[in-house]
Amino acid sequence: MFGEPPAGPALRPLATAAGLNFGVATNADVVRTDAAYRETLLVYANTIVAENDLKFGPLSPRLGHYDFRRADALMAFAADHGLKVRGHVLVWHHQLPDWLKAADYTPEQARELMRAHIFTVMGRYRGQIFQWDVVNEAITNAPRTPLRQSFWLDTIGPEYIALAFRYAHEADPNAKLFYNDYGAEELNRKSDAVYKLVRDLKQQGVPINGVGLQCHFDVAAPPNLEAVAANLQRLADLGLELAVTEFDARLHLPASAADLEKQAALEHDLLALVLRQPACRTFMVWGLTDARSWVPGFYRGYGDALPFDAMLAPKPALYGLQRALRQAPPVSGSGSARPMR
Ligand code: 9MR
């Protein structure tokens, strides 16, 4: 008689009650054109992140010109429906404008371009984006060259990272500023390099607030979650906030019922781990439905990585997330959700 309520897509109230920014990567075009998608998103998520609409290349097709139509539409959708917005991404090696890559710049010119870009984008949405990925994927796995080759490293030098955070803090002093990367979730060479980078930035007084762990996982080679928890803790001990920023859990296709159950277990266990870590109050999944995930286009033979199937029906993965939210430790304070900034 007091069994669990039927499992449906309405995770939003559970997440909000747990004090968690919980949501999906999405884009303006799908939100505008697909009513069923929109309705599902709105009962499922309390937060969105732009999958592509806030990236430099998509935003700035021509030198000196920004096209904010998609980004503005996404921000308006969020505002209309009380969704929080995570910002992704200001400084990255990928999805840069062609005009930027085509020219030669002095270090001073490149710094000024980076500053202008950060001010233009963050300035436009100042106060509306609670958390920004300021620098994304700056680290490699290679022991001798930990910083990734990129337009920014090549033109400005290693100090581009600290500069990006300083400019971002000036552009929107209230936004929480994150370093974001993949493959650095567990305890390994890359997460050691991320740890060292952010520790040094903090020690130098650079205004960095947090670290994003992307969490693009393969269900057949799942992460060691004890190592993930230990990694989160050592970063939290630096006084940093944490976020799961791009979670998905890919399966080799065709996926069996057993695969879907394994996926559900991973979704549950990762979210449960996050809910036990007070410094991590943000959990973003990299998409809503398998119909629109980046995974099949990138990992040949893989897919089914998201909580809703291609017809927008909830998968076991969704129930895994739901179970974790229902078991969330009570939010401290006087009955209201804990502040989510
Ligand atoms: O999901 C994004 C996909 O639509 C783009 O084509 C791709 C371009 O590289 O970027 C994808 O998102 C990436 C994110 O911005 C950064 N981390 C890895 C994500 C998956 O590739």
Image: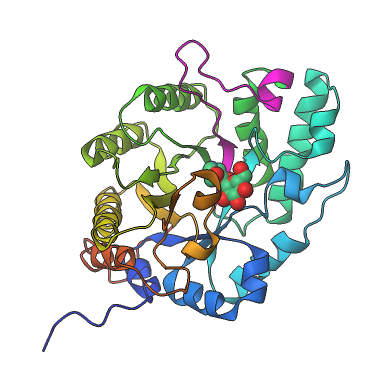
Residue positioned most to the top? 144
121 relative position to 166: left or right: right
Residue sitting at x 44%, y 77%:
43
Q: Quadrant of residue 170?
A: top right
* Applied colour scheme: rainbow
Q: Quadrant of residue 26?
A: bottom right
Rendered view: 174 above or below 84: above
Rendered view: 142 above or below 198: above
- Can residue 78 be seen? yes
- Given residues 277 and 257, the one toward you in this image is 257
* Magenta span of residues: 131-155
Residue sitting at x 31%, y 48%:
219
Residue positioned most to the left? 1
> Which quadrant is the N terminus positioned in?
bottom left
| Residue 116 position within the rendered picture, expressed as x and y whole percent measured from the top left | 78, 38
| Residue 242 position within the rendered picture, expressed as x and y whole percent measured from the top left | 40, 43
Rendered view: 115 above or below 281: above
Q: Residue 189: within the magenta?
A: no
Q: Residue 147: within the magenta?
A: yes
- Given residues 172 and 318, the one toward you in this image is 318
162 relative position to 59: left or right: left
| Residue 283 position within the rendered picture, expressed as x and y whole percent measured from the top left | 40, 54
- Can residue 173 be seen? no
